[in-house]
Image (spheres, helix red, strand yellow):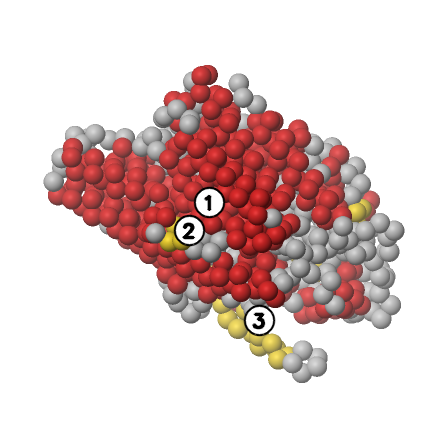
């Protein structure tokens, strides 16, 4: 049942305004972010002597619905074995402890396995509740008046934490229920062509039956594809920072900001790369957070109050490794004249300035990820998305490889 | 103990085949290997027949069988509840095994609605959440199908029904267990019905989308639909060899064995690979269907390859059935190790042939 948000915060709708647009409409996206001043002297991506493939040597050709599940093409035999073992841990379904197999779920959670949200290692769907798909999406929350747990960190909400866990093991009560609806937002392109885009409208009803208070900031998040993440991890800080321009010093209307996040292990600020807010600096950090917050599974890095974590170091390593070593599918139909034509427009109107189309990775502990010429279509920086930002605080990071073509209907 | 490395070496070789193909298609930026987006006009009719028979005969036929057998399972459980005898328990167990056959065969096409509508986890989640199940049974909740439908997938589906039917003796099954069992099997039947309807009914049946490949965005060409079929076959071959068999075998972990309560694991694996066979031949012998399959398209180019693929698939089925029963004991028996490895290798052999030899023929 969907409940209207008459009692919900007005800002809430705005927060989600262009959530879908970013993925579907580059033109609108650029007009909406960073002021949209498309300069007439935009830099072209640097020409390269060697062919550029989506994921460099990790790339595979696969246009089926299973395209995101393929291991990187250049893995050594040892790495491939580790990857396939990681495939098992990534797919492991957790249950309520005690249990002979995969204990550790909950008591509060959003879903039961990594793969339950990252369907076929791809993007999750905008669904919540008890349907067959359960909850793929989640709602991140922040109390503007709260106290960050770590320097520069999010401000958790008293009694709720940093996200709404809308499922619970039997006998426990979920923190809240999420209702998602859509409304059509019509518009017109500069040439007069009309369009209509969907705007998500979300309401959270807490366990006490009350809506989430208005002053609590909230943000709808959908699981992104897991492909190519190791390559993003392998990009050097220097390469990322070379496009950083937080104050728009060059006046091009684009103000990419690096997000420095606090690492509780090293007690240092590190460059954030992963998550919609670039709030995780490594895939391991992303993995342990997802285990802990999305599934309620304690782990060596986030043990909670468990004297012994639900999963061990090897499981964390395998799952992290799996997310580092999935292949990036090659672009499709590049012989179609519309593809290079669209690519030229993409570059001409400035999309490429944020969605970087050519990057060379640096040195990574996995040699398969090092020194790869890739097309990630992200700069890993935070960009001001305006009032309609899908995340709290206006800024968000582009996901990168979206695989839009492979999402349609499969 | 068997090392997974041996099996994976074969998979590794295939990845190089992919890369070799990719390198050839680069056009300065990146691109795929440049497969012919549409087949030779002379082959269009043959491929259309293949897609029609795959959808109508293999997929819809098998899902229809699943729906029928899920209904039979529900009826058997209702009979058991009404007359709680060992004979009726045995009949319900047999009905569970019977319903399991079309489901496992359908795992050769774990794409489309079974995936994006969540039918797979609703029907086949593993492991069973026994702690929550005990709590549910001990609660005062009315255990209706609607109640079960809203529970997490690890509390319903085939394996929860299996747990209740096979892990409990007739004397251990009380009123609450029966109430829950009926709700679970009713939900299985409902889910199977939805799954079938998603392919044949509604405003946009998935079967129609697949049969009209080449004129929709989901399958931009007929060949892309064939690639999807073959990838579905490959995925379950990999899953059987490197997941369903390897995980419990490599780790010597009985708890990792799927369908462990019913001792039906080996039959599950064999039916998985039968699904591969039927996807390739366009047949569904359980319904007497003898359709046009990918084998005929391959035979037009390479008759020997076409026949070899079918033989390799049958060899894989035979190799699985040569594993001593029950599988959950065989993984711990050193004398069974060679048979288990042979079954894995047979599956990987088919995988490699499909990806290394059949796909290039399809893409010509």
Q: Which mark is residue B47?
A: none
Asked if residue B96 is positioned above or below residue B64 in the image, the reply reads above
Asked if residue B38 is positioned above or below residue A291 in the image, the reply reads below
Tag 2 residue: B283
Provide the secondary structure element on which disc 2 rests.
Answer: strand
Tag 1 residue: B277
Q: CA distance from mark 3 to mark 1?
A: 44 Å
Q: Quadrant of the C terminus of chain B?
A: bottom right
For discs 3 and 2, the disc positioned in front in the rendered view: 2
Residue at image position (66%, 36%) is B13
Label 3–label 2 contact, CB within 8 A: no
Pinpoint residue A105: horizontal percent, then vertical percent.
44, 37
Pinpoint residue A355: horizontal percent, then vertical percent.
73, 58
Is disc 1 in the same subunit as disc 2? yes
Provide the secondary structure element on which disc 1 rests.
Answer: helix
Q: CA distance from mark 3 to mark 2?
A: 44 Å
Q: Which mark is residue A197?
A: 3
Q: Chain of mark 1?
A: B
Quadrant of the rendered image containing residue B91: top left
């Amino acid at each position: 049942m969907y409940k209207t948000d008459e009692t919900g915060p007005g800002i809430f709708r705005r927060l989600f305004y262009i959530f879908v647009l970013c993925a579907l409409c580059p033109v609108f996206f650029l007009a909406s972010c960073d002021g949209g001043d498309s300069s007439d002297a935009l830099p072209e991506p640097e020409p390269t002597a060697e062919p550029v493939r989506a994921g460099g040597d990790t790339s595979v050709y696969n246009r089926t619905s299973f395209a995101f599940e393929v291991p990187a093409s250049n893995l050594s035999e040892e790495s491939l074995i580790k990857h396939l073992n990681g495939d098992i841990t990534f797919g492991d379904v957790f249950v309520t402890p005690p249990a002979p197999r995969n204990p550790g779920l909950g008591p509060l959670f959003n879903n039961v396995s990594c793969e339950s949200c990252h369907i076929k290692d791809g993007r999750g769907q905008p669904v919540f509740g008890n349907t067959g798909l359960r909850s793929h999406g989640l709602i991140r929350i922040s109390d503007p008046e709260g106290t960050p747990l770590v320097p520069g960190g999010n401000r958790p909400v008293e009694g709720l934490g940093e996200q709404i866990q809308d499922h619970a093991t039997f006998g426990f009560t979920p923190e809240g229920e999420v209702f998602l609806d859509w409304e059509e937002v019509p518009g017109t392109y500069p040439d007069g062509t009309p369009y209509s885009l969907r705007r998500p409208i979300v309401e959270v009803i807490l366990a006490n039956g009350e809506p989430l208070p208005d002053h609590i900031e909230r943000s709808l998040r959908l699981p992104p594809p897991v492909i190519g993440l190791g390559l993003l991890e392998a990009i050097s800080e220097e390469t990322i920072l070379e496009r950083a321009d937080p104050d728009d010093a060059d006046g091009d209307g684009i103000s990419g900001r690096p997000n420095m996040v606090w690492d509780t292990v090293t007690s240092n600020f590190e460059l954030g790369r992963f998550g919609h807010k670039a709030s995780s600096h490594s895939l391991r950090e992303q993995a342990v957070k997802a285990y802990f917050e999305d599934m309620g599974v304690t782990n060596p890095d986030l043990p909670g109050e468990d004297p012994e974590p639900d999963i061990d170091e090897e499981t964390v390593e395998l799952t992290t490794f799996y997310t580092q070593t999935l292949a990036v599918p090659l672009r499709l139909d590049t012989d179609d004249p519309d593809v290079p034509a669209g690519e030229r427009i993409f570059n001409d109107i400035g999309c490429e300035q944020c969605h970087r189309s050519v990057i060379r990775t640096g040195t990574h502990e996995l040699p398969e990820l090092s020194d790869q010429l890739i097309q990630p279509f992200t700069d890993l920086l935070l960009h001001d998305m305006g009032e309609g930002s899908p995340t709290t605080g206006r800024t968000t990071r582009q996901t990168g490889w979206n695989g839009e073509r492979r999402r349609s209907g499969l | 103990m068997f090392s997974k490395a041996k099996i994976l070496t074969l998979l590794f070789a295939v990845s190089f085949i992919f890369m070799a193909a990719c390198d050839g298609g680069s056009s300065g930026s990146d691109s795929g290997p440049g497969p012919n987006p549409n087949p030779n006009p002379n082959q269009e009719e043959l491929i259309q027949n293949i897609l029609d028979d795959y959808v109508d005969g293999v997929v819809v036929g098998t899902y229809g069988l699943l729906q029928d057998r899920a209904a039979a399972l529900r009826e058997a459980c209702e009979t058991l509840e009404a007359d709680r005898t060992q004979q009726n328990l045995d009949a319900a167990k047999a009905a569970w095994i019977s319903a399991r056959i079309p489901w496992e065969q359908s795992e050769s096409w774990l794409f489309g609605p079974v995936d994006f509508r969540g039918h797979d986890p609703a029907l086949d989640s593993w492991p069973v959440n026994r702690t929550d199940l005990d709590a549910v049974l001990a609660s005062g909740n009315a255990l209706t199908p609607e109640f079960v439908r809203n529970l997490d997938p690890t509390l319903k589906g085939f394996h929860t029904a299996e747990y209740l039917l096979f892990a409990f003796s007739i004397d251990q099954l009380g009123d609450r267990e029966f109430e829950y069992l009926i709700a679970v099997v009713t939900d299985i039947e409902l889910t199977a019905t939805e799954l079938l309807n998603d392919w044949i009914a509604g405003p946009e049946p998935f079967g129609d989308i697949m049969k009209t490949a080449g004129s929709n965005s989901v399958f931009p060409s007929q060949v892309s639909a064939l690639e999807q079929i073959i990838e579905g076959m490959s995925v379950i071959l990999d899953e059987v060899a490197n997941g369903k068999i390897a995980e419990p075998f490599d780790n010597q972990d009985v708890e990792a064995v799927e369908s462990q309560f019913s001792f039906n694991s080996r039959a599950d694996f064999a039916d998985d690979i039968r699904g591969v066979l039927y996807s390739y031949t366009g047949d569904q012998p359980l319904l007497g269907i003898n359709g046009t399959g990918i084998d005929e398209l391959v035979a037009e180019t390479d008759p020997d390859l076409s026949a070899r693929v079918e033989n390799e698939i049958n060899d894989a089925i035979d190799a699985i059935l040569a594993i001593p029963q029950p599988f959950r004991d065989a993984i711990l028996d050193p004398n069974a190790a060679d048979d288990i490895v042979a079954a894995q290798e047979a599956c990987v052999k088919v995988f490699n042939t499909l990806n290394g030899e059949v796909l290039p023929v399809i893409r010509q």
